[in-house]
Image (cartoon, coloured by chain):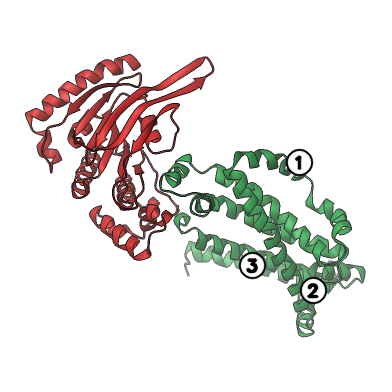
Amino acid sequence: MKIGEATRDRVLSVASPVALFVLWEIASRAHWIDPRFFPAPSSIAGTFGQMIANGTLLSNTLTTLERLAIGIVVGGVPGLLLGLAMGLYRPVYALVDPLISATYPVPKSAILPLILLVFGLGEPSKIAMVAIGMFYPVVINTAAGVRQIDRIYFDVGRNFGARGWPVFHTIAFPGALPVIMTGVKLGAGLGLILIAIAEMVGAQSGLGFLIWNAWQILQVNVMYVGLITIAVIGFVLTVLLNELERLLIPSRTRR
Amino acid sequence: MPAAAKIRFENVEKRFALRDGEHVALGGISFEVGAGEFFVIVGPSGCGKTTLLRIAAGLDQPTSGRVAIAHGEGERPENAMIFQGESIFPWMTVRENASYGLRMRGAARAHIDEVVGHYLDRTGLRRFADAYPYQLSGGMKQRVSIARAFACDPEVLLMDEPFSALDEQNRTLLQEELLRIWDETKKTVVFITHSVDEAVTLGDRIMIMSADGLPKAYVDVPFPRPRSVLDLRATPEYGRLFHDIWAQLRTEIHEVA
């Protein structure tokens, strides 16, 4: 039977992960690989089922998602507003840009101890980590996005009576939106990385805690469940943000 | 020239500081444009005509002198500009672009719909009302720009070489459409071009600008309105006027080059 190239590609891209799981299952059961570190996928699936049934997976996932969501807003909104101001007003740019350039290269994970010191072990430190991860890409991309808008559009705005806030929301924001969205995607991804790290060090809940705790008590199955869940969150986040981008930028969807 | 002056340029001067001295873009220009007059400024590239228009639009400040626009009845903006090249917002639909001026002035929704609908019809854009600029040709984009400027019903319309980026056929079509819409409104227009053809076709009166940013001559265009672009260009008077203006302009172009 002849099949089309598209169908063939789709089959192949499903086949490779399935084959990996099958191989993993066989290798683990046959003790070719150490089942203590690489438990068979079927046993991980079993643990998955138990953790869903007893509610631990859901509660930890929700905790992480809540921190992630709050942190994205807490870091993203100021990043957006400051970025717009920097892009529109040269003095603001001159004032703020050196601070951002100087602090941006510090690995965000390296300031976790400082964040713990300042915000304590509670929720604020987790949210702060996500917010920091979100803030930088958003502020940098927003400022750059506004600055690359052709000057003529600001002339048009002035000529047709746009002053103050309307300049922000009819020219600067929509004009910079494609670049801003790139920053948002970067920031959200970075936020996910940072929330996992933050929860490993100073938390009693969340997926990062789940993974770290599983290592400490050597419940490797639980660790895999946590890893897979975080991967799914990352994937869903990417899909959602791409969809959001498509909705927000109808003029750029077919370029 | 009609008795009532609509827009008056009073000794408008613009100098730019350069590293080695100063560049005089406009050397102190004074003239008046009457209410309802279609006034065309033609001059060589770099003679400062765009600067003059930007000053009239309030986008640039003159070094000295001023531009005064007389207000008629009702609340309306002083001017609206049709820009050279692409100036409609890529992130807005045709309708959103055309209604921009009215929206910025906080006009009532029903009024916006009515006026913008009218100009979308007049410019043949109704079918494209919900399209985005990337879906439009260059001529269509300039029609949006025309609709946007007319829709906000300004005291004076300023046009900065609006058709210079278009091909010959589209340019002629848009000139015709512009004349048709203008005939209905009789707005005061200050139109800038480097094309003598365009100046003679559209204008009531033409100012020839010299290379050093000063008025060199004024020419009255006697053709009756409404004008048909093609018929007009077939007349001997058109050819004579074209020749006269071109002869005056030629010396200026040599000076710049």
Q: Amino acid at mark 1?
A: Ala
Q: Is residue A241 visible?
A: yes
Q: Nearer the viewer, mark 2 or mark 1?
A: 1
Q: Which mark is residue A102?
A: 1
Location of residue A42 in the rendering, given as x and y in whole percent from the top left corner = 76, 77
Tell me the green chain.
A
- Answer whether labels 1 and 3 touch (C-beta < 8 Å): no
Q: Identify the chain of the residue marked 2, using the numbered disc in the image.
A: A
Up-down: is B250 above or below B151?
Answer: above
Mark 2–mark 1 Cα distance, whole angstroms, equals: 47 Å
Q: Secondary structure at mark 3?
A: helix
Location of residue B30 in the rendering, given as x and y in whole percent from the top left corner = 32, 26
Location of residue A47 in the rendering, given as x and y in whole percent from the top left corner = 80, 79
- Picture quarter with the N terminus of chain B: top left
Mark 1–mark 3 Cα distance, whole angstroms, equals: 33 Å
Q: Which mark is residue A40?
A: 2
- Residue at 92% across / 72% down in the picture? A217
Task: Return the residue nearer the eye: A51 or B164.
Answer: B164
Quarter assignment of residue A94: top right
